[in-house]
Image (cartoon, coloured by chain):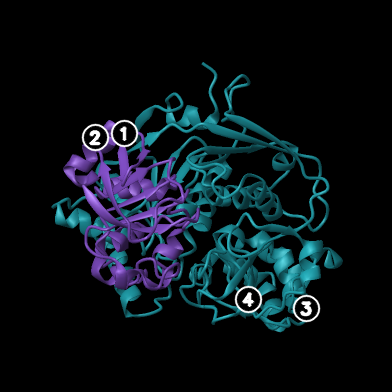
Chain colours: A purple, B cyan
Amino acid sequence: MKAKIHVYQRDNINTDEIIPARYLNTDKEAELAKHAMEDIDKEFVGRVQVGDVVVAGGDFGCGSSREHAVWALRGAGVKAVIAKSFARIFYRNAINNGFLAIECKELDEGLKTGDEIEIDLEGGEIRKDDKVYKFSPIPDFVKKIMEKGNLLETI
Amino acid sequence: MAKTITEKILGGAVGELVEREIDLMMCHEVTTPPALKMLAERGISKVWDSNKIVVTPDHFVPNKDIESAQLAKELNDWAVEQGIKHHYKLGCHGVCHAILPEQGHVKPGLVIVGADSHTCTYGALGAFSTGIGSTDCAYVLATGKLWFKVPETLRFNITGRLQPGVTAKDVILYIIKEIGVDGAQYKAMEFGGEVIDRMSDEEKMTICNMAIEAGGKNGIIETEDYKSDKDCQYEQVYDMDVSDLEPLVAYPHLPSNGKSISEAEKDGIKLDQAFIGSCTNGRFSDLQASAGVLKGKKVQCRTIVIPATTDIYKRCLKEGLIELFIEAGCVVSTPTCGPCLGGHMGVLAKGEKCISTTNRNFVGRMGHPESEVYLASPVTVAASALSGKITDPRKYI
């Protein structure tokens, strides 16, 4: 699949930046989406389009357990996050919602906001023009949840 | 095979995926209501065990606005309807990670999850406990089970003797400074050594509470009956002698930005607010330590004190601490997480600086994205409140 990307090179982008706690008085996805990434990038919500992908450094989503971080991104139209690594609870929350979180250690500064990339899930590759970034395949148990769309569908 | 305490409780080998029965689930009003909607949408109308769930509202209570009132109502109505045995309604409520241990719900060897990242606190009493999101919460409420990957364990041997005025908070800020905010990503952090052994349960809770700030899955401390085997495999062992450790202040915007108090004092940072409270440092001994510094003096910046639970509040009242705080010029509130996450009861304006006994100093954590949070111990925060700038507490000890 192809996607336009929004790149944040920094590590440790935390849940307070993805969806500040001042907006946690609601769990409505459309409301949360209005404030996605607000404390790191005020222009994000105006720029992002359905199907776009967020690219970031290591430890993405660290901090609070708020699943609102996943919902805010999804509500804003984001289809996946690719990061060098993910904080544990964010990663679980993403999987449980069937939201694609790809861990790719090979990310470098070659990717820029506005670039178009191609993600090959089966082959474990992200391609930008001639450049290829490999990632470890999605584990089977994660795939199972992703296929069902939500952890609760596995009950 | 020899195992660490975390491997024993989870019952698997490192890296293995295990499904575990949950002994206790903690629910509050921000992350649980979404889980309740998920269950309702799927026609799941009964929790797996109403005796194994602890419910307390804490984040935005007393309700800060109409939306948060709605969330609190959803939590309360559900808990009543389900006959949740351990339901701490407003008036006997508390910050979740303070009230669960206080009311005796946490025991060694239990598997505890909570829909809150600081659930790792309960490892202080020898439980495996970790934070989860709302979907996981819904899954547990429905089935009483959850999957885990058994983590590698990092062992922290904390040795030497802490100097007066240096606290558990300084020790954990030091550990996070050394290994970084992702230094324990996905891993168990096991704390031990003579310094930890000498700590009270409340001090141990401060240590384990902040395991998540190093990315840890859980923090844990051995007890009489639950210990790691002698020849267990740690992924890494850190030996840290803290005899020369000074009080630390974590500068914005990461908990790993620790600076020694002598360095921090030189910066002469002027403060607008000081906050004493939270699941990290809002227990009785924390408030008592702050009170020892504040006694008979006046604060020079606005200072908010929040006992973490109703029982702590009552004890403070009985022992004269509430009056002492108010005489010193502090504001005292009923238990709430409020200011720690910029919710209410102490939100920062643009450009304001706050020294706080809490656990996170991320951008915008306590209010405006251009405000700043400095993390420190209850005595450092109290000493700083007295001068209106970051101050070494040791002159008051």
Element carrying mark 4: strand
Q: Whole-percent x and y of residue B67?
A: 31, 76
Identify which amino acid the numbered label 2 is placed on. Glu
Circle 3 Cα neighbour tier, 10 Å, few/some/many (<14 / 14–19 / ≥20):
some
Q: Which residue lies furthest to the front in this view?
A: A130
Q: Are marks 3 and 2 in one subunit?
A: no
The answer to whether marks 4 and 3 mark residues whose Cβ atoms lie closer than 8 Å is no
Q: Which amino acid does label 3 sit on?
A: Ser
Labels 1 and 3 positioned on one and the same chain = no
Q: How far apart are marks 4 and 1 (CA)?
A: 45 Å
Label 4: few (<14), some (14–19) or many (≥20) C-alpha neighbours in 10 Å: many
Helix, strand, or loop for circle 3? Answer: helix
Q: Are marks 2 and 1 in contact (CB under 8 Å)?
A: yes
The answer to whether residue B241 is above or below residue B167 is: above
Which of pointers 4 and 3 lies earlier in the amino acid sequence?
A: 4
Along the line of sight, which residue is nearer the eye, B302 or B177?
B177
Q: Check residue B387 in the rendering and tell me which mark sits there, or answer none.
A: 3
